[in-house]
Amino acid sequence: MSLPEPHPRFATGTVAVLPPQRRRLAIVSTSNKLCGIAAYTGALERHLADVFDITVIDLDQYLMRSRHRAVRKQADAYIKKICNELADFDAVNLQVEHGTLGHETEDIFKRLSWLIVAAPGLSVTLHTFKLPASLPRDFAKALLAREFRKGGNIWRAYRRNERLSLGIARRLREAQRQKPVSVIVHSRRDARHSRHLYQLDNVFDHPLSFLSTSEAAAITASAARRRFALLERLPEDSVLIGVFGFLDAYKGFGTTIRALHHLPKNHHLLIFGGTHPNEIPVGQPIHPYLSSLFEEAYVDTTPYDRMANQASPSLSLGADRYLAELLGNHPRDLSERIHFMGALDDDDFLAGMAICDTTVFPYLEVGQSASGPISQALELGRRIIASRTHNFLEFAAYHPNAIEFFDIGNHLELAERILARPQYAARRGPPAYNVETNKAVYLAANSPLAAGASRIRRLGAAVSAALPRRLAGG
């Protein structure tokens, strides 16, 4: 398959020919609403219902994520129970985000291995694609400096990465010799790694897809600012800029706040998301990342506060006329132009995205393979401005002339792009890669023909390698 068109047989809007009887497909995933995979699994369940008889098997996150020895044993028993049930299905799809299978490396590896062995026919959707890495030089430095705790942490991180990259790939190679095994990834880069580095035979790549054309149209038609009480007092001419997801440093929301300083006062920033429940420690008055956003926006601070925090000569407030200016609200205070919309349910989250004039994805580079919100924004026909991460560049390869880019952290470039006219015209019709092409991928990946195609490719490679030798021998 060539890079420009990795799946030429899946034309836009095409639905694969249905078999006379739907195959029974088990999707092993998490239904935990705190995980984006749950939303994607829900979309798959809706869109694949007419080509498969689907059963979603939940990975109970209380059991999977526990560190307590007794509960970890219960989690192992829970996975073995799932393994016993898989024999009743024609095919099994594993939605793999490693953390949903456990906290400890060995728990993740053994549980995933059990599921791979138990599935009669298997497709694995890798939401995070791990690559093997060399042992960092800091490991030797830590040992030489007798910093054994630091060295131990480096070694454990290295072993975890190796186990969840090369180790899992080895399990999949073993399985593909015995039964149909397919791998689904979300970028062409990850597809190449799967084929060439991990030597997996049956590999499909497709970006995340959530909304059909009719679903997106219904959301857009019903979305209105009046749906959100927090926005009722905004002037009609307000320009709405949206960022999305749980508050986390890698999301880069601070870049958007810095850009807001350089935008007209009618531009407002809507932050759809809140602190992740797993990041709520006991007794902490405010999450450090949320506090950093307040600092970027000069919230609850005065000019005197900022000057006092800098290394400068002590300031004497001798004149009353300067006192009010120095102790009043900071002139750069953005508190009236930033709106924390909270952690919303799926319907409100998508409606909020639909009312935004511009959606911004200012992420830092953290090695992600895919992003659900940017896929949803594209399906809703929103204007998208994204940081130039590998993840978003790969996403744009599937959707050319749809994403406007700025360099990571460059808030001035971001501000200029928001003010400029859109770089691309609004899309007409569904994107080239959509829920129908995704459906075709899942139908092919979970077909009994998948194993035959793999065997044919291996046989063809063997014949191609042997033919020159035969010809050379006369």
Image: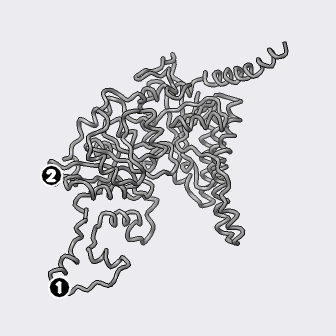
- Few, some or many residues within 10 Å of mark 1 (<14, 14–19, 20+): few
In the picture, the disc for residue 319 is 1
162 to the left or right of 353 = right
Q: Look at mark 2 in the image and give the residue it sits on.
A: 235
Given the current orientation, which residue lies at the most extreme front position? 313
Per the image, label 1 sits on a secondary structure element best described as loop
Question: Residue 409 lies in what quarter of the image?
Answer: bottom left
Is 110 in front, or is 310? 310
**Residue 7 in picture, x, y percent from top left:** 51, 25
Q: How is the image coloured?
A: one colour
Relative to 190, say whether 140 is above or below. below
Label 2 or label 1, whichever lies nearer to me, is: 1
186 to the left or right of 322 = right
Given the current orientation, which residue lies at the most extreme top position? 474
What is the count of numbered marks? 2
Q: Which three-letter amino acid code belongs to the residue tagged 2? A: Pro
Per the image, label 2 sits on a secondary structure element best described as loop
Q: Which three-letter amino acid code belongs to the residue tagged 1? A: Ala
In the picture, the disc for residue 306 is none
**Residue located 47% across and 22% down the image:** 10
Quarter of the picture containing the N terminus is: top right
Tell me which label, 2 or 1, sits earlier in the chain: 2
Mark 2–mark 1 distance (CA, rounded to whole Å): 38 Å
**Residue located 32% across and 32% down the image:** 215
**Residue 52 in picture, x, y percent from top left:** 49, 26
Relative to 369, say whether 184 is above or below. above
100 to the left or right of 330 = right
Question: Residue 246 lies in what quarter of the image?
Answer: bottom left
**Residue located 30% across and 44% down the image:** 353
Given the current orientation, which residue lies at the most extreme right position? 473
